[in-house]
Each structure stands twice: as C-alpha cells, then as structure tokens.
C-alpha cells in the first residue's frame, strides 16, 4: 500500500471509530449475543433460585436474580454510545460497582461465551461477598 493510501486508510478508520456503533450494530449485538447468553445463564440459575429476569433496554441489558444471602444481584451489559467499548457493571443489594470495561472496535468481536465469562467474574465477586457475610465459624 502506498503512503497516500495509508494516510487515507488511517483517517477512514478514525472516522469509523469516532462515529461510534450504529443502532443496527447495537441491536444485533444484544439480539445475537447478549440475550442468548442471558438465556443460558438464566436456564442454569433457575434451577437454584426462584426468580431470574433478563431484560433488554436500548443500550443495556440486565440480568437480575434474588436470594436469601443477597437480596438483589444485577449484572449489566452496557454498550458505550461513543462506540469504543462495552461495560459490565453490577449491583449487589444497593451497592453499584462499575465492573469491567472492554474496548472493542466491532461489537461482532464479542461472542456469547465472552458475555458468560464476564458474568462468571461477577458471580465470583458475589460469592466472595456472601462468604464475607457469614459468621467466621461457618467459613471454616
């Protein structure tokens, strides 16, 4: 590729990044990736907790479930509207945590297993919080 083409390509890519994700890309990401991942998680969690809800909004999706130890567990997948990433914030009871953030140029690069892996990171933090709440005699 010649130098003129390299410069043009650089600014073409930069323009794409600056524009952010299209509404169609975001919709496809939630329909094809996030919600199917939530459905798989929900199928497993439903065996152990009575109420598991997955819900999609315009630019985020939430998976919520409640248990005796933690009344409110909410895992979120939020697309950055500027088009440079996806965040995985969560809430335990009424404590909100920003969670992981992944920079990605193309939402299609993220698959269902990636979403489930981030859910499992949240789940491990949640389990640690439950363990910390137990009296010390129960921990051993």
Image (tube, rainbow, N blue to C red):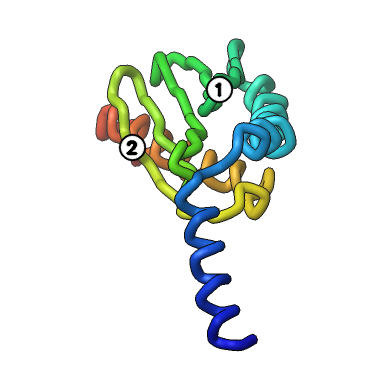
Q: Residue furthest front?
A: 4
**Which one is nearer the viewer's eye here, 11 or 80?**
11
- Give the number of the disc on residue 98: 2
Label 1: which residue?
58
How many neighbours does mark 2 have within 10 angstroms: few (below 14), some (14-19), or many (20 or more)?
few
Name the foreground residue: 24 vs 93. 24
Pointer 1 and pointer 2: residues touching (CB < 8 Å)? no
The residue most toward the bottom is 2
Residue 37 visible in the displayed image: no
Residue at the spot 50% in from the left edge and 55% down from the top edge = 15
SS of the residue under disc 1: loop
Residue 12's quadrant in the figure?
bottom right
Q: Measured from the top left, where is residue 132 in percent x and y?
A: 29, 34
Residue 78, labelled with which disc? none
Assign the C terminus to one quadrant of the image. top left
Q: Nearer the viewer, mark 1 or mark 2?
A: 1
State the residue lying farthest toward the left. 136
Q: Earlier in the sequence, mark 1 or mark 2?
A: 1
Which quarter of the rendered picture does the N terminus lie within?
bottom right
Front one among 107 and 137: 107
Q: What element does badge 2 sit on?
A: strand
* Residue 44 image point, x, y percent: 69, 29
| Up-down relation of residue 32 to residue 102 (above or below) | above
Q: Quadrant of residue 29?
A: top right
Q: Give me the residue at 25% from left, 34% from top.
A: 136
Which residue is at the front of the view, 112 or 29? Answer: 29
Q: Position of residue 103 (x, y in %)?
A: 46, 54
State the CA–CA distance, disc 1 to disc 2: 19 Å
Q: Residue at x 53, y 24 (%)?
A: 62
Residue neighbourhood size for the residue with mark 1, other residues' Cα within 10 Å, grouped as few (<14), some (14–19), many (≥20)? few
Residue 135, above or below 25: above
Is residue 128 something that shows in the picture? yes
């Amino acid at each position: 590729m010649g130098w003129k083409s390299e410069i043009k390509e650089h600014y073409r890519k930069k323009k794409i990044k600056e524009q952010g994700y299209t509404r169609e890309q975001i919709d496809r990401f939630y329909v094809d990736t996030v919600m199917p991942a939530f459905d798989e998680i929900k199928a497993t969690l439903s065996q152990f907790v009575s109420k598991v809800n997955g819900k999609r909004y315009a630019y985020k999706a939430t998976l919520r479930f409640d248990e005796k130890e933690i009344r409110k567990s909410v895992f979120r997948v939020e697309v950055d509207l500027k088009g440079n990433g996806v965040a995985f914030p969560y809430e335990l009871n009424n404590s909100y945590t920003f969670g992981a953030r992944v920079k990605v140029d193309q939402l299609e690069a993220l698959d269902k297993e990636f979403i489930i892996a981030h859910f499992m990171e949240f789940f491990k933090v949640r389990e640690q919080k439950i363990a910390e709440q137990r009296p010390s005699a129960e921990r051993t």
